[in-house]
Amino acid sequence: MSVKPTSIQRILFTADYCYTPNKKIVDASILCEDEKIVAIGNTSSFNVDKNTNIFHLQGTYAVPGFIDTHIHGAGGFDSSTAEEGKEDFKLMSKTLVSHGITSFLPTIVSIPRKRMLSTISTLAELVAKEYLGAAPEGIRVEGPYINKVKRGSQNEEYIRSIDIGELKEIISAGQGKIKIMTFAPELDNSIKLVEILKENGIIPSMGHSMADENAVINAIDAGAHHCTHLYNGMPVLHHRSVGIAGVSLTDDRVTTEIILDGFHIHPRMIDIVCRTKPKDKIIGISDAIQGAGLSDGVYHLGSTQINVKDGKALTDEGIIAGTTLTLEQGWNHLVKYSQLDITDAAACLTINPAKLLSLNQQGELLPGRNADISFFSKEINKAVMTVRKGKIVYIDKAYTFNSHISNPGVLSRNHT
């Protein structure tokens, strides 16, 4: 591939191999111009000029930047208290990109009506901005129309029946930024809720629910084709009583999320999902809280205090409350625990969530797509460099690489 001199910002990245994720390319090179990938292939097919910035990332492999569609916080920021800590939102973006995540949905839990509207409004303003880190692609709302019995760590006081008037206020407060909303299918007016969400381009996601088979199927027929963190926040998978877990596993219309922290779900249960569902209907999530990327300590999920010890997040009552791990560790767990081919595993964190959210320029390393790329160490499976829209936004200071830099502007990053 011959490259002619031009004033366009051009970078060539080389890695031992890459997952596009549809295929593996050995001795891979990825050529980026401005925000886009313009060519990808074996390094031997590239011939670049002296004006091209070149980064030789020995001992690494490349994947599309990970997309986390269900994450409550990171770096000290909690989405459910965004009004109080909105100046820290950039810390969430910066933390996530250091773990190979280039896009995410800040997620809120059930909170009082007035505060929910103002929090969503605040988040809508925050996600509309640009950050030198992971990009917020919208807002996720987990509640408040869920079943109290399966509320998990959410505050029971703020869980309520479906109120169509309030729902419309929530949608209005989101200013078009709400992408997913979790609800319990067994609640009155759930079908009407699904219809309104669909009309407004919001994905209805079934979860935190005690729904029986009929209620789940009715919701799916109405257009609820997504399941919030399968297995968690629902009755256990049972051989005589098929509820939301059983139906979601066996109905190919439904895309299922699985939490990949290695604590929420037994490894064999992760493997059951990967053996049962169509490969493009599995999405790995973190469900991380504000302590993600930080050390053990006391954190919050909305109004609930979360105690983190040895990386496990629990309420004072001992209820699992999200996690402090990111999709970087989740990627390792998925590869280790499932029988998925590695390209299919990569798809669960890249192209599958991109398709769910209609992020048509993301999730694949292909010419014409956004240059959102994560480079991982082959030896320890840890992110060592992250690129978003052609800009290097993170470099692990402990990692050394060879480079030819003709324009230092490519190093406009937030890792310093």
Image (spheres, rainbow, N blue to C red):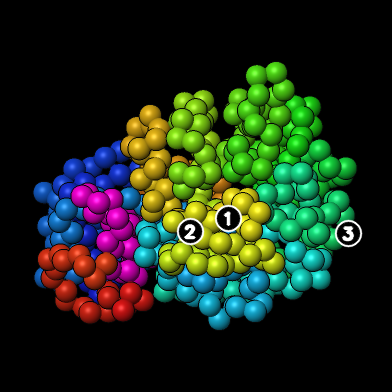
Q: Is residue 186 magenta?
A: no
Q: CA distance from mark 1 to mark 3?
A: 34 Å
Q: Is residue 389 magenta?
A: yes
- Quadrant assignment, res 406: bottom left
- Quadrant assignment, res 11: bottom left
Nearest the eye: 208 or 179: 208
Q: Which region shows up in magenta?
A: 366-395
Q: Which residue is mark 2?
A: 309
> Which amino acid does the dot numbered 3 rest on?
Gly
Residue beneath the point at 79% across and 60% down:
158
Q: CA distance from mark 3 to mark 2?
A: 41 Å
Q: CA distance from mark 1 to mark 2?
A: 8 Å
Residue beneath the point at 27% across and 74% down:
410
Q: Position of residue 84 (x, y in %)?
A: 65, 79
Q: Mark 3 or 2, which is nearer the eye?
A: 2
Q: Answer few, some or many: residues within 10 Å of disc 1's Cα (few below 14, many 20 plus, some between 14 and 19).
A: many
Residues tagged 1 and 2 counted as in contact (Cβ below 8 A):
yes
Judge from the rendering whether residue 357 lies leftward or rightward of residue 271; answer left or right: right
Give the SS element for disc 1: strand
Nearest the eye: 160 or 313: 313
Q: For residue 165, which numbered disc appears in the image? A: 3
Q: Answer few, some or many: residues within 10 Å of disc 3's Cα (few below 14, many 20 plus, some between 14 and 19).
A: few
